[in-house]
Amino acid sequence: MVIDKTSYVPYYKQLAELLRYQISQQQAQGILYQLPSENELAEQHGLSRATVRHALDELEQDGWIYRQKGVGSFAPVRRVEQDLSLLVSTTEDMKQRGLSLLTRVIQLQQVHASPQVAAALELATGTLVYELCRLRIVEDTPLSLQTAYLSLALCPRLEANDLSGSLYRLLETRYELRLWTARETLRARGATPAEAELLDIPEGAPVLSAERTTYAANGDAVEFLDAVWRGDRYDFKVTLSRPLS
């Protein structure tokens, strides 16, 4: 991409679009990108500093970059945001955003339910349940490590299915479990050594831990999910309403 001096599009608009493309490429790699200086951009593209500054002003106003006086202009690492008021799978969520998602199945095994898992799934402690651990990779960056616990009675022969897609869709189509609502608890903590290795972050780096119990329309507890999200790449959001007095 180059500046077309014969185009009717203003030079600063062309430069802004070119820089958006470059920023998108860097964000896909999950790194903080420092733009060249105004002088370097002006020299590279044969433009005046005023034109370059105009393009940077537009990018800053649109949230593409931020500036640090005396240091330079930076494009922040792209973050993913989840609306806590909606019950959607990670697969569905990323598809709606137009983001690429790769799911790596780490492990699927039958384990005896711990007291926490048993209570969530409304089973007796020690009951055999499926433990499905998956790494979710978004835009080529490990984003979340998710361990789901599911009842053998509700999901017989889970191992016979493709587990690299939407688990919610599988539960609804293969096992006819109409997922309806969920209860979720969020905590902030540091990454364990195993989590840090899989998520490609330093040990002890901030992560968001989410524990969710998902229920079917008939009230059955279908899934207990223990998920860890990278704190530097993921945000949770919720809309709050003040009750009328």
Image (spheres, rainbow, N blue to C red):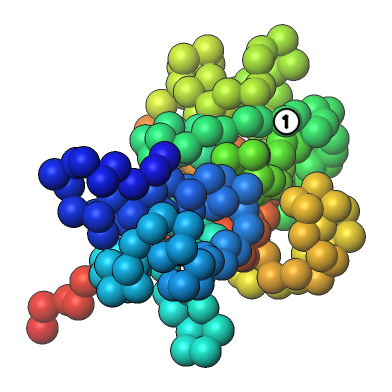
Q: Amino acid at mark 1?
A: Arg
Foreground of the two, 173 or 84: 84
What's the residue at 52%, 89% (across, down)?
70
- Horizontal side, residue 178 vs residue 120: left or right: left
Which quadrant would residue 12 be assigned to in this image? Answer: bottom left
Q: Is residue 245 visible?
A: yes
**For the N terminus, which image quadrant?**
top left
Secondary structure of residue under mark 1: strand
Identify the residue position indicated by label 1 in the image: 104
Height in image: 199 above or below 42?
above
> Residue 210: horizontal and vertical position, in percent?
60, 58
Foreground of the two, 24 or 237: 24
What's the residue at 79%, 42% (across, down)?
113
- Horizontal side, residue 58 vs residue 127: left or right: left
Height in image: 129 above or below 230?
above
> Residue 242: horizontal and vertical position, in percent?
19, 77
- Horizontal side, residue 212 vs residue 126: left or right: left
> Residue 208: horizontal and vertical position, in percent?
62, 64
Residue furthest toward the bottom?
70
Q: Is residue 210 visible?
A: no
Foreground of the two, 145 or 224: 145
**For the C terminus, which image quadrant?**
bottom left
> Residue 40: horizontal and vertical position, in percent?
50, 67
Height in image: 78 above or below 218?
below
Which quadrant would residue 102 be assigned to in this image? Answer: top right
Which quadrant would residue 6 be assigned to in this image? Answer: top left
What's the residue at 46%, 72% (across, down)?
39
